[in-house]
Amino acid sequence: MRIGLISRGRTCSTAVLLSLINKYNLTNHHEIYFKVGRNLYHDYYSISKGDHNRNSRFKDNIIKFTNNLFLEDNFITKLWPSMFIATPHRVLEPFIDTKEKIIFDTNTYLRIKEYDQLYFLDRDLHTSASSWVYSKKSKIWRKQPKQPIITIDPNDYGIVKFYILEYCLQQKMKTFMLENNIPFIDIGTNAEPYIDPTAKIVKSNNAYSSLITNYDELHNFITDYYKICMDNTKDWYYT
């Protein structure tokens, strides 16, 4: 069985993934697609041959990676929209410069219709974006006895922008699947029924309004930038 988990960071995707592994006895490929972007930094052979078109090399490597993945019959992997955006992972403005880095052709590059099961996992944008930037800045990804208090500074907002863009892209992927009758299990924002209660996974349940000193400012930024993202990506579609 081949399973794809369409999600993004800080949506309980790891908990759901590990639970599905236990249920179906799957090979865990976790966030394996991120290797493609990382490997471009070490692709000295192509660069030495004068191939400096990073976007083209990224797309070629995604296809090779997907084809190798589908040689297996029993696996699960996360499918985050950010995995299919050529690095660096930041929003380039004007937005058209970012669009050129994104893979929208899900059939050629992801072979999305060939999965036996697809799951769609979501989470409230404000909570998940706050969780993402908090974890990125604090370097803490799991529940700790004592969580540090942080302040979001101007440099951190680039992380927030990219996460909001990914949220918009994930919703567009869902729209694409619905419009093209691609079957998927919509977990939505309630992951609990899909998480194995025996798994040793502790939810953070962090109150980010208490952990981020300028949380109100962050909250307002998320609201405002989401509107900007929606407006600038209204004609972007997956195929």
Image: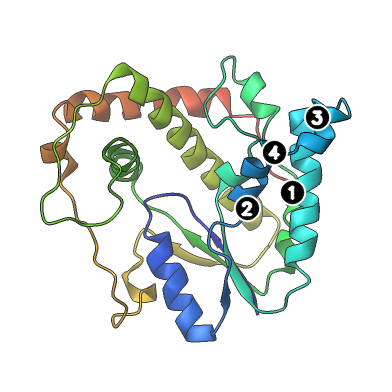
Residue at the image point whose x is 81% and y is 44% from the top: 60
Q: CA distance from mark 3 to mark 4?
A: 10 Å
Identify the coloring.
Answer: rainbow
- Residue 158, compared with residue 207, is above or below; it is above
SS at circle 4: helix
> Mark 2 sits on what residue?
33
Residue 122, given in percent of the width and then of the height, sits at: 42, 54
As drawn, the residue found furthest toward the top would be 94
Label 1 close to label 3 by CB (< 8 Å): no
Residue 40's disc is 4
Label 2 close to label 1 by CB (< 8 Å): yes
SS at circle 1: helix
Give the amino acid at mark 3: Ile
Q: Nearer the viewer, mark 4 or mark 2?
A: 4
Q: Nearer the viewer, mark 2 or mark 3?
A: 3
Give the amino acid at mark 4: Leu
Residue 45, given in percent of the width and then of the height, sits at: 82, 37
Say whether residue 199 is visible. Answer: yes
Residue 47's disc is 3
> Mark 1 sits on what residue?
62
SS at circle 3: helix
Upstream in sequence: badge 3 or badge 4 = 4
Give the amino acid at mark 1: Ile
Upstream in sequence: badge 1 or badge 3 = 3
Give the amino acid at mark 2: Tyr
Q: CA distance from mark 4 to mark 2?
A: 12 Å
